[in-house]
């Protein structure tokens, strides 16, 4: 889909029939409404109402498509397709993939070692390849006698790092379109209702890539971060662009109300050393007029071009990734895990008794009446997470979000949703454990009191809590 100006999909409602079609627009997209389905009618990996089956299938296919050198993969990356990471249970789930982070503390402040490629260490490179169109000034830098050969090194962890080899597991995307639709005030209310000892941080971060269908969002606006292990990303559109760049090395440029979004247009530099232009991948160079009009690098992999006349246009892959993750339904009930109702009912009561619900809240999330993305309005769901950041003590990964973050801030982690845990192979942020009981026993910091209460229970009561957690779907109370 590379290079197309028919950028993505937009929700339309014609005579009450919901459909999704291609679009290119200089304004805001129309909205769609649809009746709310019951949990039992949506299979794992299925779509919420509000998008046609064919449009969802097309977005899913794009999400699963493997990228190569000609598409812009590299120069360094963690995977070749979004669906290769998000695969547990169904496309869009969690994954086996664990990315790696590093950094150090200097005078009590976190240093991501940006000059050495930090803090994300991509695990793979495109290696050696020939580019017959390599610019003359960049030829012969890799191997004598082979002027068009490119040699991209694999990143290594810098010797100067003191926070080393910290893992982050691929997070599931199920139901996140509903979470994206929630207003900031809802998360403020969750924090206000928590006791001071376990109160989470409502992390507000600037919007770099707004949801183009939401007229309330603008570039630079502060919004509650709700995605990623650190709750550092405020919108699903931004989540898609960030992952495409940092996990697959594919650079993009889009337009928003006449402004060129260039934040995702620069190739990653292995250990901080940029590859010569033409040795990052084999994607075509951008035309000089596009470079002049937008200010993007010539080697940006996929650009929509000039943003003149107030154009709003999302790069086509990003539009599809956004559509897929927006309409990917949350996990529903599981008959197998709910067969032992006695154990589950006891576990439900114990879950609250020991305090797990302090952060993994049982509060009902209810989407606004008319979410701009077209997901169902007034949809009630229970992800069992407050999506806030909590000091996790020894369980925190010690990696700061921003340069200068304190040690305590670097211990902060977003509360992981519990819905759909039954299809997860690995738990906790770094995938260190595979069972719920052990995961609970690894909790620390603001979760230590609940952990200690869990540890004080009998083995049968602990089993009941595990059975309850494994049964959680979006209709669980």
Image: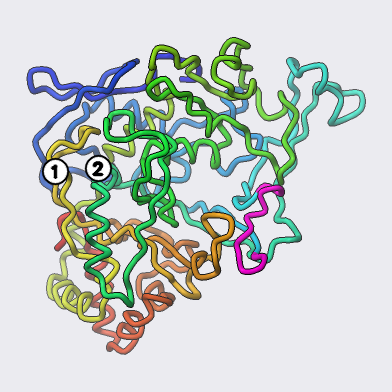
In the image, which residues are magenta? 105-117
| Residue 426 figure quarter | bottom left
Of labels 1 and 2, earlier in sequence is 1
Q: Residue at x 21, y 22 (%)?
A: 30
Q: Which residue is mark 2?
A: 181
Q: Is 287 located above or below residue 281 in the figure?
A: above
Q: Count residues near mark 1 (Cα–Cα under 10 Å), then give few for <14, some for 14-19, many for 20+.
A: few
In the rendered image, residue 474, in percent from the top left (x then y), is placed at: 19, 54
Q: Mark 2 falls on what kind of element?
A: loop
| Residue 209 figure quarter | top left
Residue 298 magenta-drawn? no
Q: Which residue is mark 1?
A: 41
Residue 232: mark in rendering: none
In the rendered image, residue 171, in percent from the top left (x then y), is placed at: 41, 52
Q: Residue at x 71, y 47 (%)?
A: 115
Find the distance from the CA under tag 1 to the CA under tag 2: 22 Å
Colour theme? rainbow
Q: Which residue is at the front of the view, 291 or 158?
A: 291
Q: Residue at x 59, y 10 (%)?
A: 289
Q: Count residues near mark 2 (Cα–Cα under 10 Å), then give few for <14, some for 14-19, many for 20+.
A: many
> Which quadrant: the C terminus?
bottom left
Q: Residue at x 74, y 40 (%)?
A: 273
Q: Which residue is at the front of the view, 439 or 448?
A: 448
Q: Nearer the viewer, mark 1 or mark 2?
A: 2
Q: Mark 1 falls on what kind of element?
A: helix
The mark tally for this picture is 2
Q: Which residue is at the front of the view, 53 or 247?
A: 247
Q: Is 6 located above or below residue 178 in the figure?
A: above
In the rendered image, residue 409, in percent from the top left (x then y), is placed at: 49, 65
């Amino acid at each position: 889909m590379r290079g197309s100006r028919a950028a993505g999909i937009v929700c339309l409602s014609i005579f009450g029939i919901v459909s999704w079609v291609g679009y290119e627009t200089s304004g805001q997209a129309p909205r769609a409404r649809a009746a709310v389905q019951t949990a039992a009618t949506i299979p794992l990996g299925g779509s919420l109402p509000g998008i046609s089956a064919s449009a969802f299938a097309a977005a899913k296919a794009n999400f699963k498509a493997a990228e190569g050198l000609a598409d812009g993969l590299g120069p360094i990356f963690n995977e070749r397709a979004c669906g290769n990471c998000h695969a547990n249970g169904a496309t869009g789930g969690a994954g086996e993939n664990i990315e790696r982070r590093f950094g150090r503390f200097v005078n009590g402040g976190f240093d991501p070692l940006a000059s050495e490629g930090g803090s994300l260490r991509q695990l793979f490179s495109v290696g050696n390849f020939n580019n017959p169109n390599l610019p003359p000034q960049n030829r012969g830098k890799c191997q004598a006698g082979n002027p068009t050969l490119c040699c991209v090194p694999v990143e290594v962890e810098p010797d100067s790092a003191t926070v080393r080899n910290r893992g982050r597991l691929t997070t599931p995307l199920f139901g996140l379109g509903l979470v994206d639709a929630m207003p900031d005030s809802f998360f403020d209310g969750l924090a206000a209702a928590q006791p001071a000892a376990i109160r989470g941080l409502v992390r507000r971060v600037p919007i770099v890539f707004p949801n183009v269908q939401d007229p309330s969002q603008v570039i630079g606006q502060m919004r509650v971060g709700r995605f990623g292990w650190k709750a550092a990303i405020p919108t699903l559109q931004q989540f898609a662009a960030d992952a495409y760049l940092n996990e697959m090395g594919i650079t993009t440029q889009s337009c928003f109300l006449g402004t060129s979004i260039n934040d995702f247009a620069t190739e990653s530099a292995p250990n901080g050393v940029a590859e010569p232009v033409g040795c990052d991948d084999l994607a075509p160079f951008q035309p000089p007029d596009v470079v002049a009009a937008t200010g993007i690098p010539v080697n940006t992999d996929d650009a929509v071009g000039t943003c003149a006349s107030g154009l709003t246009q999302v790069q086509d892959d990003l539009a599809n990734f956004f559509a897929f993750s927006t309409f990917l339904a949350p996990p529903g009930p599981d008959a197998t895990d709910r067969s032992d109702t006695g154990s589950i009912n006891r576990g439900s009561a114990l879950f609250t008794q020991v305090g797990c619900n302090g952060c993994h809240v049982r509060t009902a999330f209810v989407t606004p009446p008319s979410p701009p993305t077209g997901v169902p309005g007034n949809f009630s769901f229970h992800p069992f997470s407050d999506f806030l950041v909590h000091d996790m003590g020894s369980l925190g990964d010690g990696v700061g979000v921003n340069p200068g973050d304190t040690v305590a801030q670097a211990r902060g982690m977003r509360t992981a949703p519990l819905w759909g845990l039954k299809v997860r192979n690995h738990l906790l942020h770094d995938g260190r454990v595979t069972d719920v009981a052990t995961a609970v026993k690894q909790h620390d910091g603001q979760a230590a009191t609940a952990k200690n209460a869990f540890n004080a229970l009998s083995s049968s009561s602990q089993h009941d809590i595990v059975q309850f957690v494994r049964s959680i779907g979006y209709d669980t109370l």
